[in-house]
Image (cartoon, rainbow, N blue to C red):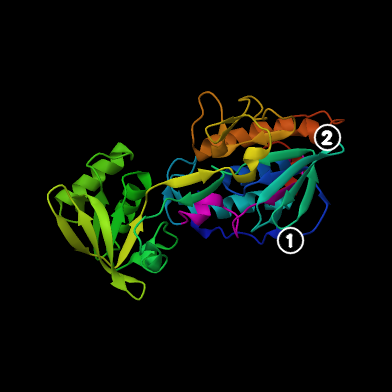
Amino acid sequence: MVDLSLIEAPPIKTAEPGSGPIETDMVIIGAGPAGLFAAFEAGLLDIKCHFVDALDKPGGQCAELYPEKPLFDIAGIPACTGQELTNSLLKQCSPFEPVFHLNQQAEKLERHEDKWQLTTSENTVLQAPCIVIAAGGGSFVPKKLTLPNAQDFENTSLYYAVRKMATFEGKNLVIAGGGDSALDWTLNLQPLAKRLTLIHRRDQFRAAPDSVAKMHKLVEQGKIDFVTGQITGLNGKDQQLHSISVKTAETEQNIECDALLAFYGLTMKLGPIADWGLNLSQNHIDVSNETFETSTAGIFAIGDICQYPGKLKLILSGFHEAALMAHTAHHYVHPDKKLVFRYTTSSKDLHQKLGVT
């Protein structure tokens, strides 16, 4: 079995902002797992790809919000972190040499002769017969604490994501929230923290039942504390928390705290994509579940941003969507070539391209 922890992300090809017009076969908006796998599937069909992503590195939410969080539902991989999955996907698509335009947002989309022309926030211009929107939930930002001094502690002792688990080693850590992120990190950081307290406004959770059961067991064993209440104050100085104030049904109390992780969910915004004339449903893009094409010919959507009957927001669903999308896109990119489906196990030319001996 391949140890994903040993896979390093290969160097990526980037382009200078403001360049163009650049002609390619497919522009993928969003370099998360679904987008990266789409570049691999497209590459198998001789479709060249350029990425546009608002983040400073590939990986989407996996790399930005939970690079060290374990994932357990990737087919054939018992467990891997978000960053390990990103590194592996980058290595997988690297033989097809995708080009990345990072720190840029897709802004303007218009028809240019027989192709789509996409202009980014950095005035990079890309032209392609196919556009693939793989932007997760659009522009995602954490819902933040609304306390007046919260900003004073951000990124020094108040965090909305875990980028390095070692940051919380030996700390009096408080985690606030009741969803999967709050429960998952409670379980994963408990062995590292000096003391860990989970705070949620009620004793019911929106997380996986198995995670909730494991959390309650840790409480029973005295390894973590659970408080039902709301954070009402942040206490500290020089950007460093020393305690938080919590209001419960019975009283108010201060809890010693070196670091606070707040997981109140994400605010999703489609940004300029909302103005592109696509069929939208509650901030998601409606697609065909056979082709993953939107209401506009040549524009596709895959991953969390797309919506169709039976849709599941899972990374593995995005992989499936990427494969079917690429086969439909082939007709736009190579209209004069008949698509012959080939298994990667039996194609000699693919073996040569992928460096398989």
Measured as percent of width and height from the top left, residue 234 is found at: 29, 64
Q: Is residue 225 above or below residue 335?
A: below
Q: Is residue 282 above or below residue 241?
A: above
Frontmost residue, 161 versus 108:
108
Residue 190 in view (yes/no): no
Residue 17 — which label?
1
Q: Secondary structure at mark 2?
A: loop
Instruction: State the CA–CA distance, disc 2 to disc 1.
Output: 28 Å
Amino acid type, label 1: Pro
Q: Which residues are magenta?
A: 44-67
Task: Say whether residue 66 is left or right of residue 106.
Answer: left
The furthest residue to the left? 250
Residue at 75% x, 38% y is 130
Asked if residue 65 lies in the magenta stretch, the reply is yes
Measured as percent of width and height from the top left, residue 211 is found at: 30, 43
Frontmost residue, 352 versus 34:
34
Task: Say whether residue 349 is left or right of residue 180.
Answer: right
Task: Say whether residue 227 is left or right of residue 73.
Answer: left
Residue at 87% x, 30% y is 336
Residue 322 in view (yes/no): yes
Measured as percent of width and height from the top left, residue 261 is found at: 35, 58
Which sits earlier in the primary sequence, circle 2 or circle 1?
Answer: 1
Corner quadrant of residue 144: bottom left
> Mark 2 packing: few (<14 Cα in 10 Å), some, or many (20+)?
some
Q: Secondary structure at mark 1?
A: loop
